[in-house]
Amino acid sequence: MAPRTVSHISSPSQSIEKREIRFSNLEEQVSKELKWFYVRYPGGGSRYLYVDSHKYGFVWPNITMFCIIHAIFFYSFYLLYVEGLKYYAIKGVGYGMTAGLGVTTGAHRLWTHRSYEAKFPLRFLLIACHTMAGQNDMFTWVRDHRLHHKFSETDADPHNSLRGMFFAHVGWLLTKKHPDVHIKGRTIDMSDVIGDPLVQFQRKYYIPFYLIFRFYIPIRLAMWTTGVDFYTSIIGLFSTYVGSLHCTWFVNSFAHGFGDKPYNAKIQPRNNKFVSTITLGEGFHNFHHTFPWDYTIGEFVWSYNLGQIFIEWMAKLGFAYNLKRATGEQVQNRMLSARRVKDGTLYQNDHPYEIPHEY
Ligand SMILES: [Zn+2]
Ligand SMILES: [Zn+2]
């Protein structure tokens, strides 16, 4: 196959200087002082990408949208306080938690990591819940998260925490992706997800599904069950929607910045109880990045891990099976290595993950 080719532009305002380089030299080129370059993919299509990580390429439509929804978010809290819409808030949190189950036990533990298998009724329920969450379609969610695991804390990690807490939290959605995200993203095996008819169905009709599940149903539900008017219901919706987005983003920011590292001392992901509490158990991130195939995401079931409890209930009912867990011996070995790294008796100068894994 012919090598991929890249042309580069020295500056967006200057005349275009096209320079063909071999794909194998791409990383070397990117690491130099290029600001813009032009990628032509072998299968067709091309795009300009912003390279200089110190000068972010802002995505202004996203920034504008985020400013607007956050203004509504804060206004909705004012409304909830002034109008005393407690029942509205309680029902909104219930809807958000159901949607959250679709993200944690569906998109994350089932489709991304294949940490258990599920029968069709459960898969259907989880993808519907995931659509309720409004966190992009399943294919995109899984691809970004597999990329995050395979290339953690590098430029190919979509929310690389080494670029700062704000970038890891939300900044990555407001700026152009680093070229490595696109380039190394093509190395992620997505064949299982591409071959899943449910995922394809959701992706094909995602926009109407998104509008129905994330807006129409919760707005109408709140009106029917609490008696609020249409306007108040729309405003109130943003209190739970934006709040739930931040809960997910805290995994990428706080759980990569604050907490302890008992299983692998050489990586950034940490165990964070605050994050676990607001994400149905997703905050035991040092454990998760060390044993990504483990359906529990954490060593202890009592650790706010509602996602684990839900999967175990589903297994008892016969809808989930082949649940994967790290063995006690594997966990003990990792903890021992982590302690030795911390006290300086073990130095790992290779890739920080001793157990190689794709995702
Ligand atoms: Zn994960
Ligand atoms: Zn992570």
Image (tube, rainbow, N blue to C red):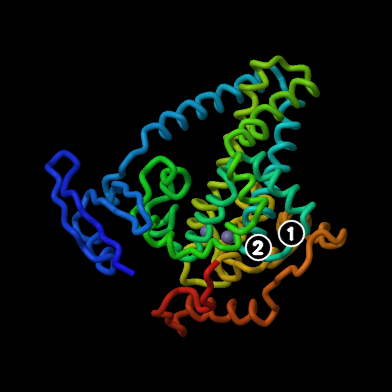
Q: Where 78 sits versus 133, above or below?
A: above
Q: Earlier in the sequence, mark 1 or mark 2?
A: 2
**What type is the residue that disc 1 sits on?**
Gln
Q: What percent of the width, then of the height, locates residue 56?
A: 30, 44
Q: Is mark 2 within 8 Å of ligand 1?
A: yes
Q: Residue at x 61, y 60 (%)?
A: 284
Q: What percent of the width, then of the height, locates residue 7?
A: 21, 54
Please identify the quarter of the rendering in which residue 21 is found. Answer: bottom left
In this picture, residue 308 sits left or right of residue 67: right
Q: Residue at x 29, y 51 (%)?
A: 53
Dot 2 crowding, Cα within 10 Å, few <14, some 14–19, many 20+:
many
Q: Which residue is mark 2?
A: 297
Q: What percent of the width, then of the height, locates residue 148?
A: 48, 59
Q: Where 293 sits versus 45, above or below?
A: below
Q: What percent of the width, then of the height, locates residue 336?
A: 58, 81
Please identify the quarter of the rendering in which residue 24 is found. Answer: bottom left
